[in-house]
Image: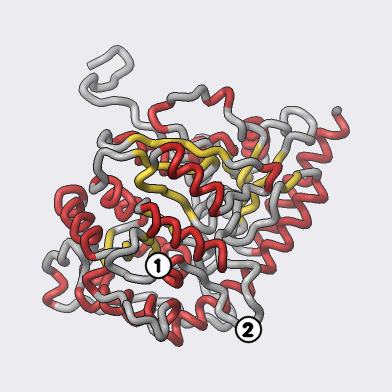
């Protein structure tokens, strides 16, 4: 054992941004049950009742058979329900339809992504900057593939067209691309005709698209009168041939993060490989929880839940944006989706003009945010964090309740005003 008390056989494993900030807050007395604290760093939506949403599930029935292990790929009945939901939402009238064999169920989003990453071969895999913090370790721990970063520019509103994508795939020899859509943290959404072109490119150039769609029901610029959801599944021609792999679950879009029920949807060959990886990585999810998830996927439940969260979260988005802009936080792009605002704090007085400085100062006011540098996905720490392009950014979550947002933004407003007076 080393002098620091570390077992030398183990390497230091970095924390994701959300875990880091909550750990630092805990040192100052933070607890999820402490009402004095406001967690604008949280990656989960509020989980209580919403007007117009289905009643929340507070108990489940556990059958005798549910004491046994679930299949690694997930319960057949749940996989059938997931496939049917995708077909009804996105593939009406199309010849090629998803079936249970196109779905794998996992115990959490990271488990689903880890299964897919473990099944990748010796390839170049592209990923965007900025993007979801947990991708960093995921892209480093598996050594078969090489992670290739692609920088998106705030000055362009983080735009990246299908023509840009073609150049990257061909120029860098990419065989796969990992991205969140809508993007966590920027809220940028690839949708409609542009998303169709991305799927077409994946098919044409045989580049697998691994698309994290966990925020795909939090869409803020959808067509009026239509359900505000989007998925690349809408543009897949052949579900078993098009190299499009989708990740989603109950975590965000159904507001049940604690259930840890997520899924992967894609070609059968990919699903078989991911399930095989799951057999040694995690062994599968909870059988009773999977069974309880099935009714949540009915058309009525999905429509009611999605409509309710859209109404509530859009009000919170508008409220947070107005308050942050008034404080002097700049936004490169108004979010198309997610429940985050990606704010540029460069024009605030020191030390608030730095993401980590803003985070530390906000902690003193019992408000948690996430510094932008954590979204500079840097597998293997090949680039210096001090040189991060996102050091002057902060991710603000409007996942909490409106009352929490009001308290937090009042405190941040006072913090900025005080710094300006000192300046």
Q: Residue furthest top?
A: 3
Is residue 265 toward the left or the right of residue 387 in the image? left
Which corner quadrant holds the C terminus?
top right
The colour style of the image is: secondary structure
Which secondary structure, mark 2?
A: loop
Number of numbered discs visible in the structure rendering:
2
At horizontal 59% and vertical 38% (from top left) the residue drawn is 372
- Which residue is at the front of the view, 233 or 321? 233
Is residue 110 toward the left or the right of residue 364 in the image? left
At horizontal 34% and vertical 81% (from top left) the residue drawn is 95
Query: Neighbour class for label 2 at 10 Å: few (<14), some, many (≥20)?
Result: few
Which quadrant holds residue 378? top left
| Residue 2 versus residue 377 in the image, above or below | above
Find disc 1 in the rendering and name its residue.
250
Is residue 237 toward the left or the right of residue 333 in the image? left
Residue 169 marker: none
At horizontal 38% and vertical 81% (from top left) the residue drawn is 94
- Which residue is at the front of the view, 219 or 231? 231
Residue 225 marker: 2
Could you tell me residue 278's position as x and y percent? 20, 53
Could you tell me residue 216's position as x and y percent? 50, 65
């Amino acid at each position: 054992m080393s002098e620091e008390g570390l077992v030398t056989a183990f390497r230091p494993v970095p924390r994701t941004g959300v875990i880091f900030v909550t750990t630092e807050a805990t040192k100052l007395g933070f607890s999820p049950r402490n009402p004095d604290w406001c967690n604008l760093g949280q990656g989960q939506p509020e989980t209580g009742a919403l007007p117009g949403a289905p009643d929340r599930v507070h108990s489940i029935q556990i059958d005798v058979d549910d004491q046994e292990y679930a299949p690694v790929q997930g319960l057949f009945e749940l996989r059938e329900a997931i496939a049917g939901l995708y077909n009804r939402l996105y593939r009406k009238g199309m010849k090629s339809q998803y079936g249970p064999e196109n779905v794998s169920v996992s115990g959490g989003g990271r488990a689903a992504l880890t299964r897919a990453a473990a099944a990748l071969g010796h390839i170049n895999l592209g990923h965007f900057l900025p993007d979801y913090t947990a991708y960093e370790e995921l892209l480093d721990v598996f050594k078969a593939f090489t992670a290739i970063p692609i920088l998106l520019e705030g000055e362009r509103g983080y735009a990246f067209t299908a023509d840009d994508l073609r150049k990257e795939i061909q120029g860098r020899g990419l065989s796969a691309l990992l991205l969140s859509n809508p993007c966590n943290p920027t809220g940028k959404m690839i949708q409609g005709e542009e998303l169709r072109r991305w799927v077409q490119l994946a098919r044409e150039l045989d580049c697998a698209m691994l698309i994290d769609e966990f925020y795909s029901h939090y869409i803020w610029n959808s067509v009026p009168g239509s359900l505000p959801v989007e998925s690349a599944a809408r543009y897949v021609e052949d579900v078993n041939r098009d190299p499009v792999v989708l990740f989603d679950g109950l975590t965000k879009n159904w507001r049940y993060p604690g259930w840890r029920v997520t899924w992967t949807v894609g070609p059968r060959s990919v699903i078989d490989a991911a399930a095989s990886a799951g057999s040694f990585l995690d062994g599968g999810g909870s059988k009773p929880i999977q069974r309880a998830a099935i009714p949540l996927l009915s058309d009525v439940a999905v429509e009611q839940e999605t409509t309710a969260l859209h109404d509530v979260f859009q009000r919170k988005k508008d409220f947070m944006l107005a308050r942050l802009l008034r404080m002097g936080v700049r936004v490169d792009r108004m979010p198309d989706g997610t429940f985050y605002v990606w704010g540029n704090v460069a024009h605030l007085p020191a030390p608030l003009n730095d993401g980590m400085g803003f985070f530390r100062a906000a902690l003193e006011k019992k408000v948690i945010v996430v510094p932008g540098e954590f979204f500079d996905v840097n597998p293997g720490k090949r680039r210096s964090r001090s040189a991060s392009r996102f050091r002057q950014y902060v991710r603000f979550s409007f996942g909490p309740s409106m009352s929490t947002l009001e308290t937090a933004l009042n405190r941040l407003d006072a913090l900025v005003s005080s710094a300006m007076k000192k300046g």
